[in-house]
Image (tube, rainbow, N blue to C red):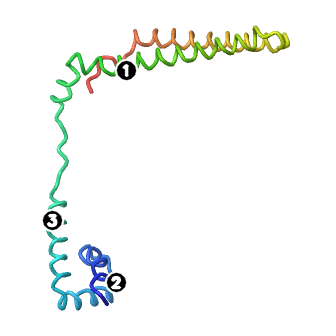
Amino acid sequence: MPGDEFKALLMGYLDEELTHEEVLRVENHLRECQGCSLELEDFRRLKGVTRDMRVLMPDDKYWEDYWSHIYNRLERRIGWILMSLGAILLASYGLYEILEKFVLGPDIPWIIRIGIVAFVVGICALIVSVLRERLFFIKSDKYERVKR
């Protein structure tokens, strides 16, 4: 077999994932092919390096410092506020267009107009209710002072 076919088996050989027959074939090939033997050694070194790698996690002091800075605390809040304002403006314009075309349009039956107005008023009432509830819970959040 050409050496390229054995190169695909080298990692399996190193990880002991090959069958007994494949191991014998690879070992015979390694005795004859210097290139594959060198590549296997490179794989062994790479495996050793990656096995010894550890992910360094920042300690709690780093996160406390991060959240204590005013910029870090405000950047997400400002992003959410701007995104919310944009969504409100787009939704308001869309509702205005719907009301202008369907409620104020001369060829729309009265029952459809009443249904659309009831639907829009219902959505607005639900949004106000949810916002009021969230504002109430923000004031009494029992997990507010829990450290991350």
Give the structural element (helix, strand or loop) at label 2: loop
How dense is the environment of label 3, judged by Cα within 10 Å: few (below 14), some, or many (20 and up)?
few
Identity of the amino acid at label 2? Answer: Thr
Q: Which residue is mark 3?
A: 48
Nearer-the-camera pick, 65 or 32: 32
Task: Residue 33 in the image: state x and y as whole percent.
Answer: 19, 87
Is residue 101 left or right of 95 when viewed as pictured? Answer: right
Give the structural element (helix, strand or loop) at label 3: helix
Q: Which residue is mark 1?
A: 79
In the picture, residue 118 is in which quadrant? top right
State which mark lies toward you, 3 or 1.
Answer: 1
In the rendered view, tell whether residue 132 sits above or below residue 41.
above
Q: Which quadrant holds the N terminus?
A: bottom left
Q: CA distance from mark 3 to mark 1?
A: 44 Å
- What residue appears at the point 24 percent right and 18 percent down from the top-left corner? 71
Mark 3 vs mark 2: which is more N-terminal? 2
Task: Residue 17 in the image: state x and y as whole percent.
Answer: 31, 76
Task: Residue 57 in the image: state x and y as whole percent.
Answer: 19, 41
Nearer-the-camera pick, 33 or 66: 33
Is residue 14 left or right of 93 when viewed as pictured? Answer: left
Q: CA distance from mark 2 to mark 1?
A: 56 Å
Nearer-the-camera pick, 54 or 79: 79
